[in-house]
Amino acid sequence: MSLMTEELKTRPSGGLQKLHHWNSPKRQRTLSLTDEGWDTASELAMESNTNRSEVVEIVLRYIKEEKLDLIDIRKDILT
């Protein structure tokens, strides 16, 4: 089943790390984001009925799968 057709599920907080649709355990990490980046992640999470962590996971995996050039993307966004 493709990820696009599969219902997005959030990871329960606390307790044991469980494997979910990513087939990999999730762990708490630390990121530094601008306020705008945080707000954008929050908006996207609300729109897709998920959480910011899942938004970041999806975006990162999509970038990798599509072999997108992050430097070019950043240049386009900043100009």
Image (cartoon, helix red, strand yellow):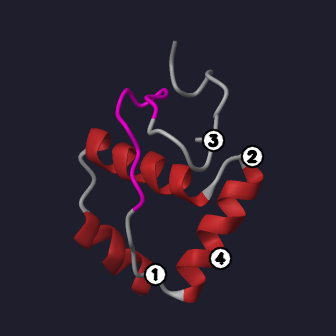
Q: Earlier in the sequence, mark 2 or mark 3?
A: 3
The residue range painted magenta reads: 18-28
Instruction: Say which amino acid is labelled 1.
Output: Leu
Q: Secondary structure at mark 4?
A: helix
Q: Secondary structure at mark 3?
A: loop
Distance from disc 2 to disc 3, alpha carbons, whole Å, reads: 9 Å
Instruction: Say which amino acid is labelled 4.
Output: Asp
> Would residue 73 appear left or right of 55 to someone viewing this image?
left
Instruction: Say which amino acid is labelled 2.
Output: Asn
Q: Which residue is mark 3?
A: 10
* Pointers 4 and 3 in contact (C-beta within 8 Å): no
Distance from disc 2 to disc 1, alpha carbons, whole Å, reads: 21 Å
Determine crowd level at label 2: few under 14, some 14-19, many 20+ residues with C-alpha closer than 10 A.
Answer: few
- Name the disc covering residue 33, or none: 1
Main secondary structure found in the magenta portion: loop
> Would residue 18 appear left or right of 38 to someone viewing this image?
left
Q: Where is residue 6 drawn, in percent x and y?
A: 61, 22
Determine crowd level at label 1: few under 14, some 14-19, many 20+ residues with C-alpha closer than 10 A.
Answer: few
Q: Which residue is mark 4?
A: 39
